[in-house]
Amino acid sequence: MTVDSTAPSQPAIENLLAERRTFPPDPAFTAQANAKASLYEEADRDFEAFWARIARERVDWTKPFEQTLDWQLPFAKWFIGGTLNISENCVDRHVKQGLGHKVAYHWIGEPGDTRTITYADLLREVQKAANALKELGVKTGDRVAIYMPMIPELPVAMLACARLGAAHTVVFGGFSAEALAGRINDAEAKVLITADGGWRRGKATPLKPAADEAIANAPTIEHVLVVQRLGDAAETSMTEGRDVWWHDIVGRQPETCSPVPVDSEHLLYLLYTSGTTAKPKGIVHTTAGYLVGTSFTHEMIFDVKPDDVYWCAADIGWVTGHSYIVYGPLANATTGVLYEGTPDTPAWDRWWQIVEQYKVSILYCAPTAIRAFMKQGEEHPAKHDLSSLRVLGSVGEPINPEAWLWYQQNIGGGKTPVVDTWWQTETGMILITPLPGVTTTKPGSATFPFPGIEADVVDNEGRSVPLGGGGYLVLKRPWPAMLRGIYGDPERYQETYWSRFPGMYFAGDGAKRDEEGYFWLLGRVDDVMNVAGHRISTIEVESALVDHKKVAESAVVGKNDPLTGQAIFAFVILKAGVEPSDGLGIELREHVAKVISPIARPKFLMFTPDLPKTRSGKIMRRLLRDIAEGRTLGDTTTLADAGVVDAIRERSGAAEE
Ligand code: WTA
């Protein structure tokens, strides 16, 4: 163990900030880097030819593709005519090339139990699980819902679906029964794969009861496959004829199961994400383009080499886990770390202990985690030898320069490149990012579009804003891992992403570019909040509140928060005759946690007699945001009743949790 006495203190970081320092690549890193500046030139010359080359080089095709791209705006098809199986590309081919002994995942349970899964193990387990799914009636083209903690059976389940050409829809284990049921119903999933529970913050946390509650309202589910993680630590009831234990059915399956070759555009998975309405959208991802995009970006942006130990600390339930824990890294035969628990259990140095023990060389996490570590103090990382780290990544929300510098100095020893990566569930792969060894970074900027990606910042009319100015982030060209649509709703797809600025993909984010063309992401410009890197729609939370029998109306806004980026602030109008009280405030917050997820529980809740509305009846969220932030109010002349604002403000002192 080494203690780095040179870790800079906060004033030192402030000096760095004041200097507006830039970080050119270290020549020693550049000399060995996977990414080369020439990639930008190659992609600029002919972006289709660029992606075609990569697709030919990286994918084992069962039938080669004939055409690179068919672009009928906004509907894209990539690598047309090709067939492949993604599980074969992620597992079988590595074993065939002699990498069966290589570790695919070092799994670490929160209580300290561990499992080592090699590529040979993964191949065997995926085939057995695929055979079990077949026995349960799953066929090519079906959908399978997955609701699990962070255990090795989760990636195994995803790959088993993909092996059969069945689409998975993973629902984050922290979501409620109601949220799970909504997703199962939209996807019309036939089988649910879940677990008795997992370990979280030192406690056995059951999952099966929520799964049962969901299935009661999800008639398409025929069978439930249940992994035993907690065993005696949970009481799990199984429904005869419907539920089967994973170890019973998977355990007795044959160890081989041929991968089903599917079309390049075959549905790989659905992942539901919050939009600007109460109903989450099923984002559609297909097979070949997604594999090409995630594996190539993973190798270039994280500079992954055969000996690296790579740890993406997201949950597989989010897109970051799909693309950069499962598909991208496995396609590259990477050794990864998979950790079940939270960063504070049993103590705040848990991550750093894992980095030291497994010699993690690449770490990818969210600014929220970094800010939480900053708050706990640099003594926690300083207790451990973190010298194995050579690349650090950030994702999910804008990273403030202080957090960027703290990360680089205290975790990266002041020497590692930091890659701040911008992307979305919809984009499937990272789109705006530095390339380590190539890009000079600026703390807080995601820098430039990845080779082959055309991003721009436009004004209200869709005109490109000159360098130095801000506006809306748009993408002007298709990319291989892009969403193919919203499940079952092509009109909503067109409307949500392609109609605000005709011909361009509207990401929903604000951005500015500095004089040197660096992109600086400014957060969402729509009714989506970003709380600790999780996307939550204001309207979803409002619907959950109004769903409570004592609530007449509500309005929800995101309030700036030093730790979680944004925090949820709910304004609530009670039904006539109901008296506001602290107890009711707690009850309503809990209600939201139950209906959606604890991640959506409002941090602030204010009872109000009315809400500020325009004459046409629209809630004035901008005004509510100002109230939530305690800012001086702007122009209120479109208000129906200006007195409402005063009434709300008078109460705002009592709003904090
Ligand atoms: C935000 C997560 C700034 C952004 C991969 C985007 C970011 C939303 C960054 C997508 C970043 C993600 N800098 N903002 N590096 N990365 N975002 O779908 O608002 O969960 O639209 O995908 O997160 O969130 P999602």
Image (tube, rainbow, N blue to C red):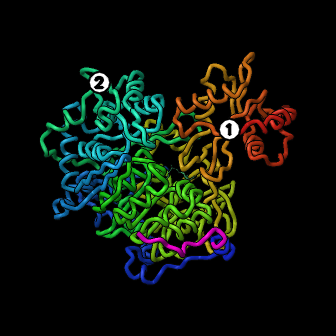
Q: Quadrant of residue 654?
A: top right
Residue at the image point whose x is 44% and y is 57% from the top = 351
Instruction: Find the residue positioned furthest to the top.
Output: 577
Residue count near mark 2 (Cα–Cα under 10 Å), binned few <14, some 14–19, many ≥20? some
In front here: 341 or 454?
Answer: 341
Camera-nearest label, 1 or 2: 1
Q: Is residue 643 visible?
A: yes
The magenta stretch is: 1-12
The percent position of residue 486, horizontal first and vertical second, equals 46, 41
Please name the amino acid that badge 2 sits on: Met
Label 2 sits on a secondary structure element that is loop
Q: Is residue 9 magenta?
A: yes
Q: Taken as a whole, is the magenta stretch helix, strand or loop?
A: loop
From this view, report whether residue 39 is shown above or below residue 132: below
Residue tagged 1? 657
Residue tagged 2? 238
Q: Is residue 129 magenta?
A: no
The percent position of residue 120, horizontal first and vertical second, equals 18, 55
The percent position of residue 11, horizontal first and vertical second, equals 67, 71
Residue 244 horizontal side relative to residue 563, left or right: left
From this view, report whether residue 605 is shown above or below residue 375: above
In front here: 519 or 347?
Answer: 347
The quarter in which the C terminus is drawn is top right
Residue at the image point whose x is 32% and y is 63% from the top = 55
Q: How many marks?
A: 2
Label 1 sits on a secondary structure element that is loop
Q: Decide which of tag 1 and tag 2 comes sooner along the chain.
A: 2
From this view, report whether residue 213 is shown above or below residue 569: above
The quarter in which the N terminus is drawn is bottom left
In front here: 403 or 12?
Answer: 12
Residue count near mark 1 (Cα–Cα under 10 Å), binned few <14, some 14–19, many ≥20? few
